[in-house]
Amino acid sequence: MLEPQSTVLFALLILGFAALMYWMVRTRRIIVRVLAAVLAFALAVQVGILAVNKYFDYYPTWGAAITDLTGSGSNVAQVSDTKLVTGGFGKAVVPTPVNRALAELQGFTFQVTMAGKASHITRLGLVYLPPQYFQSAYRNYQFPVIELLHGQPGEPQDWIDVAGITDTLDQLVNNGLARPVVLVMPDVNGGQRVSLQCLNVYHGPQDMTYLAQDVPADITAMLGSRIEPPGPAWGLAGYSEGGYCAANMALHYRGTYGFAGVLSGYFSPELTDILVNGKPVDPFGDRRQLFANTPLAEVRALDPGEPVPEFWLGAGANSPADVQAADYFAQLLALHEVLPPVHTSPGGHSFGVWRAQIPPMLEWMTAGLTSAAANLHRQVSLASHHHPPCPPTGTDHGRLLASRTPAHGQRTGPAPYRDRSLHYRYCKSGSGKHSTSKHH
């Protein structure tokens, strides 16, 4: 009854404020008046804070508020790259020490520095390894990955403490409604007074490069063969500003992400909200760059038959702008034979809506990622029966394979020869390390 969004709590605080004001007016003692005024002011501030919290549906319980504000209950290990070690289940990078018995039951979340070689941006981020990551039955399993993009204002921890995504994922997996995945939660903006909407700013920070290239590369380097490589078995999801980021990044990096979840997102950059140190900035050098980062325009510009990631769209039923934006984006995607689910939940542009939408989004996305991973493994298995020789150890696979690409007009041979990404994965896995001649 007395949780942060409780109507009873609001009524009690307002009655307390009224009583203090009455006491302040009636009493003749100065010290009592001052005390009543201070207490009344404190209650008024509390009512305002709770009103904002109720409007945005941020903290549903006092436990969630305490956990988020103090970080006391989030079970996040603070580690650095130097403390990442090879675990016992194949090439599994896990912080040490870790209570494996506990991790097998509730998973393990750790904070790590994600350094961007291409963007030259370095930020802290969170990684969640599900309980199955530590279980013997999944010793040789490669986990799909979902990269989660928070809103603004916000931070990676909001996905855990406010949205409750790790607990939700565990419950869904235990009930057979979702498949286990690794969750990666990077710092989207790098500061509370920064809002770059995951864009590569003209002559400025290269946020999209960091989030879509450097973060996947860093996570792949850390977790190695325990996760699927970036591609069809990687997903993106975000809410509010993070929803725009997910849509824009998924369209820009169609080879990196196979699935995208957009919760109350928008599909054109909001130029007035792009801030650096609290000051507005223009991220684009010209209108071409603006249109190139407008998902609505990006979908319209796609040629027929071009591959497009699968999308899941959500919006609050009480936010007409969000619903209309999701419906229109879905119509554009339908022209490219992508039919995204559009899920509406009671409420507006708030965490209450996003908490309600995370379970169906996870059910949809984890099923799709698992299916994509299985399909990719089948293709690799087929390619292993007919593939060119693997380059020597230490050779740049991409450069060597590119040198073997036939000139225009020449025959390309069987399909496995044409798909260089599959052949690269086959050789990198070690399956073809003894291959010295072409298979016929």
Image (tube, rainbow, N blue to C red):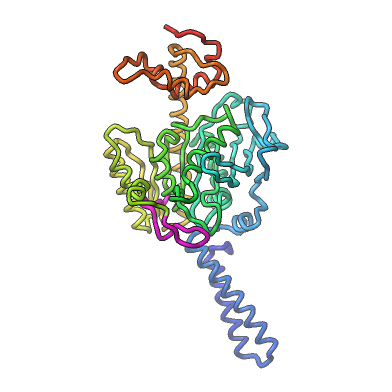
Q: Is residue 260 above or below residue 268?
A: above
Q: Is residue 267 left or right of residue 174?
A: left
Q: Is residue 254 above or below residue 284?
A: above
Question: Magenta stretch containing residue 12, yes or no?
Answer: no
User: How many labels, in total?
Assistant: 0
The C terminus - image quarter? top left
The N terminus - image quarter? bottom right
Residue 163 in the image: state x and y as whole percent: 53, 50
Q: Is residue 19 above or below residue 283?
A: below
Residue 273 in the image: state x and y as whole percent: 43, 59
Residue 135 in the image: state x and y as whole percent: 63, 29
Which residue does the image show at 53% across and 36% down from the upper left? 173
Residue situated furthest bottom in the rendering: 28
Q: What predominant SS class does the magenta segment belong to?
A: loop
Which residue does the image show at 45% across and 35% down from the upper left? 256
Is residue 16 among the parts visible in the rendering? yes
Quadrant of the rendered image containing residue 165: top right
Question: Magenta stretch containing residue 274, yes or no?
Answer: yes
Q: Is residue 268 above or below residue 302?
A: below
Viewer-proximal residue among 363 and 157: 157
Residue 125 in the image: state x and y as whole percent: 58, 45
Viewer-proximal residue among 250 and 312: 250
Viewer-proximal residue among 270 and 48: 270
Is residue 132 among the parts visible in the rendering? no
Which residue does the image show at 56% across and 40% down from the upper left? 170
Span colored in magenta? 263-282
Q: Is residue 87 left or right of residue 440?
A: right
Viewer-proximal residue among 139 and 171: 139
Which residue does the image show at 55% across and 30% down from the upper left? 227
Quadrant of the rendered image containing residue 139: top right
